[in-house]
Image (cartoon, rainbow, N blue to C red):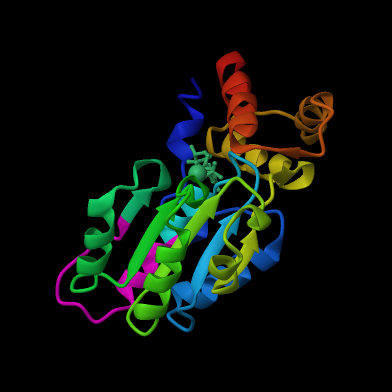
Amino acid sequence: MIKQFNAYKPKCFDDLVFSNPIVKAKLKGYTEGKKQKSILLWGEPGTGKSVTAKIVANDMIKHEDTLFESQPLVINGYSWSEQTRSKIENVWSYSNVVVIDEVDEIKGKQALLTDLIDQYENIGTFIFTTNKKPTYLLARLVDRCDTIKVDALDTENAFRVVRKILDENKIKRTDDSIKFMIDKLSIKSLSWLQVGILVDDILARS
Ligand SMILES: Nc1ncnc2c1ncn2[C@@H]1O[C@H](COP(=O)(O)OP(=O)(O)O)[C@@H](O)[C@H]1O
Ligand SMILES: [Mg+2]
């Protein structure tokens, strides 16, 4: 649907954009290999949590002195099964990060996850994402994580993102006309889908 904007999907840590600078500053500690506590990214859908988790996980793996290229194990909470547990237990020989997306979907096994964090705390890190509030999750699980809220883009940052893409495409639009389009949405913050629709709309009409 947002075909053109999809070409701007973030591919590395530098590509990630957040309204709150604290998010990137906190995550940098992990990508630089200085921190290895597990992470819980939470916030509204479409704020970039899943893509952020994968990029941070990739960078954390690069910090390990492994001889081979490895990919982080990415699990979705929807598809939790008995085999998932052994997959996690076997991952540490080739990776030091496990991403569990939509962790709130794992209903009865959050205590097991807590045990896994404790068991492997010196070996690896878990990065969890959820669209729910942390209070929705097992408290013991949340306690073990660096809890980071990811917000939708405020209008100022949304403007910067749109401006940059239009400039790259050599499309001449005044700052005011872009701001007008964003203001017309009458919202304080935008999901990436909303930013994408706006960008594709402008590109299609240019
Ligand atoms: N910094 C960014 N720049 C451009 N697109 C982004 C950025 N962060 C996320 N996106 C895009 O927004 C969409 C939603 O991101 P996603 O990580 O799935 O959000 P969430 O997991 O919070 O629901 C994806 O298509 C993603 O590529
Ligand atoms: Mg997600």
Where residue 134 appears, as percent x and y from the top left, is: 64, 57
Q: Magenta span has 62?
A: yes
Residue 197: in magenta span:
no
Quarter of the rendering occupied by the C terminus: top right
Determine the residue positioned at 71% across, 28% down. Answer: 173
Q: Is residue 12 visible?
A: no
The image quadrant of residue 142 is bottom right
Residue 57 screen position, x and y as percent:
39, 63
Q: Residue furthest left?
A: 67
- Number of labels in the image equals 0
Q: Quadrant of residue 19?
A: bottom right
Residue 64 x/y as whole percent? 29, 79
204 with respect to 107 (left or right):
right
Q: Is residue 150 visible?
A: yes
Between residues 174 and 4, which one lies in front from this camera angle?
A: 4
Looking at the image, which is closer to me, 86 or 33?
86
Q: Can you say whether 188 is above or below 177 in the image?
A: below
- Left or right: 77 as drawn, with respect to 69: right
| Residue 130 against residue 39 in the figure, above or below | above
Left or right position of 42 against 60: right
As drawn, the residue found furthest toward the front would be: 108
What span is colored magenta in the figure?
Answer: 56-73
Q: Please name whichever residue, 100 or 188, is drawn nearer the observer in this view of the structure.
A: 100
**At x 41% / y 64%, what residue is drawn?**
113
Q: Residue at x 30, y 60 (%)?
A: 72
In the foreground, 108 or 129: 108
